[in-house]
Amino acid sequence: MSLTRFITRYRLPLLAGVLALIGLVTALAPLEKTLGARVRLVYFHGAWVWSGKAAFALAALAGLAALVLRRARGRWAAWSLALGRAGLVFWLTYLPLSLLVQQLNWGGIYWDEPRWRVPFAFGVAAVALQAALTLFERPLLTALGNLVFGAALWIGLANTQNVLHPDSPIFGSGSLRIELFFSGLVALSVICMLILAQWFYRPAD
């Protein structure tokens, strides 16, 4: 049995298993002197948003492949659509999680924080884009839409300033243990995202 068929056949238990592992790693993650146990939610929140960013980046690359490899355009466009949908799921679940992190760690929600305001705007745009791509079902449109959106998201976030949000809270911690736990969470979250994308994938006719 190929890996693709295995994932297709067992994707629900695989997804549940990976989510359970994410929960376990989050629960066992090291504490931090200032935030205490609340830092575990920060780890999960960070891994989740990076997985969403990875999904949109892969959707953009699949869109680029669809534009370049014309004979396989339908297949790559289908993957671009699936990855874009997976990215949307991660993004829409990350946004309320971001508000919870603010409330618990800052004692309130700062609506004008660029690291909230810009991702929220991209979330609204992602909903509109994925709805349009699903409605029109045009491989070329899917490829172009996800390529432009993925590039815009990465460039936009890279140029977003921080107000209350620290620049690099994990990799600026100086703790190898924290960095390793976070990297493990990111890896598991990306695996979860890929399983979800495979679930959304519909081969081109």
Image (spheres, grey):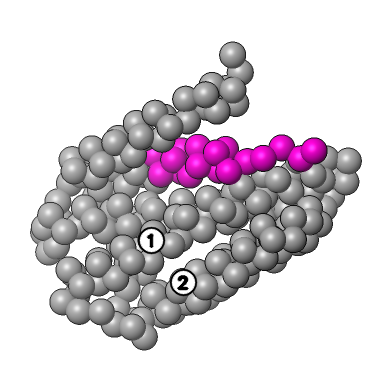
Is label 2 in a helix, a strand or a loop? helix
Residue 193 visible (yes or no) = yes
Location of the N terminus by quadrant is top right
Location of the C terminus by quadrant is top right
Residue farthest along the bottom direction in this orientation: 112
Q: Residue sitting at 29 percent across and 71 percent down? A: 99
Q: Residue sitting at 70 percent across and 45 percent down? A: 78
Q: Which residue is mark 2?
A: 119
With respect to residue 154, does 18 lie above or below? Answer: above
Q: Disc 2 vs disc 1: Cβ atoms closer than 8 Å?
A: yes
Asked whether, in this view, residue 132 is left or right of residue 165, the answer is right
Residue 157 visible (yes or no) = no
Q: Is residue 160 magenta?
A: no
Q: Residue sitting at 32 percent across and 47 percent down? A: 182
Residue farthest along the front direction in this orientation: 135
Count the marks: how many? 2
Q: Position of residue 44 (x, y in %)?
A: 30, 52
Question: Which residue type carries mark 2?
Answer: Pro
Say few, some or many: other residues with alpha carbon within 10 Å of mark 2 (under 14 / 14 to 19 / 20 or more). Answer: many
Q: Pick the residue in front: 203 or 163.
A: 203
Question: Which residue type carries mark 1?
Answer: Tyr
Which of marks 1 and 2 precedes in the sequence?
A: 1
Q: Which image quadrant is residue 114 in?
A: bottom left
Q: Which residue is mark 1?
A: 94
Q: Pick the residue in front: 154 or 107.
A: 107
Q: Is residue 189 magenta?
A: yes
Q: Which image quadrant is residue 23 in?
A: top left
Say few, some or many: other residues with alpha carbon within 10 Å of mark 1 (under 14 / 14 to 19 / 20 or more). Answer: many
Q: Position of residue 146 (x, y in %)?
A: 67, 60
Task: Write down the region rendered in magenta.
Answer: 188-205
